[in-house]
Image (spheres, rainbow, N blue to C red):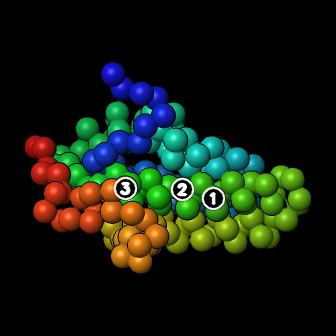
Amino acid sequence: MKTLFRFPNPVNEVSARLVAGGVVLLTLVILGFHQTWLIAPLAYGFAARVATGPTLSPLGQFVTRVLTPALPVAPRLVPGPPKRFAQGIGATLSVTAAVAHFAFGATTFALVLVAMITVAATLESVFGFCLGCKAFGLLMKAGVIPPEICAECADLTLRHPVNA
């Protein structure tokens, strides 16, 4: 039985990069056209993806149900916990931006946080470089994140094979 509040493991990196591309587009609209009201759906999307993966995220649903299956690209499975950690960083930044903007009127601060999200999401979507995943790996090496959180991350021989 599939539970609602579960993050997928493994994650299809193709979908993760496409979601990051959607985040880039959304943040560029926020920044380029000063559409600060879109900070709220940005924050919701990150919070939903942290809690449930793509299940409660409109962007996640579009990518995993429509866009990814339509592309002639093989899935590339990667461990889920680092991707969830990265989504958590995005949630922290975007929720902080929403509170700063909507509750305190600190729009400049909020837009700086949105710009930080834009940089990280661009690195993920264009280059496949996940800053949150790299931070997750460093925290595992430092012993802050225990190995049992992500066995595949701690032991590369346990990586999931790609299902074609």
Q: Residue at x 64, y 50 (%)?
A: 43
Q: Say what secondary structure mark 3 lies in.
A: helix
Q: Secondary structure at mark 2?
A: helix
Give the mark nearest the N terminus, 3 or 1: 1
- The residue to which callout 3 is attached is 149
Q: Position of residue 117 (x, y in %)?
A: 57, 65
Can the viewer see residue 55? Answer: yes
Q: Amino acid at mark 1?
A: Thr
Q: Check contact, mark 3 vs mark 2: CB within 8 A.
A: no
As measured in the structure, the alpha-carbon distance from the residue carrying label 1 to the one carrying label 2 is 6 Å
Q: Amino acid at mark 2?
A: Gly
Q: Given contact means CB atoms under 8 Å apart, are the residues at marks 1 and 2 in contact? A: yes
Q: Assign the N terminus to one quadrant of the image.
A: top left
Expressed as whole percent of the image width and height from the top left, the position of residue 49 reads: 50, 44
Residue 59: x, y in percent?
A: 48, 42
Q: Which residue is mark 1?
A: 92
Rendered location of residue 18, percent (x, y):
38, 52
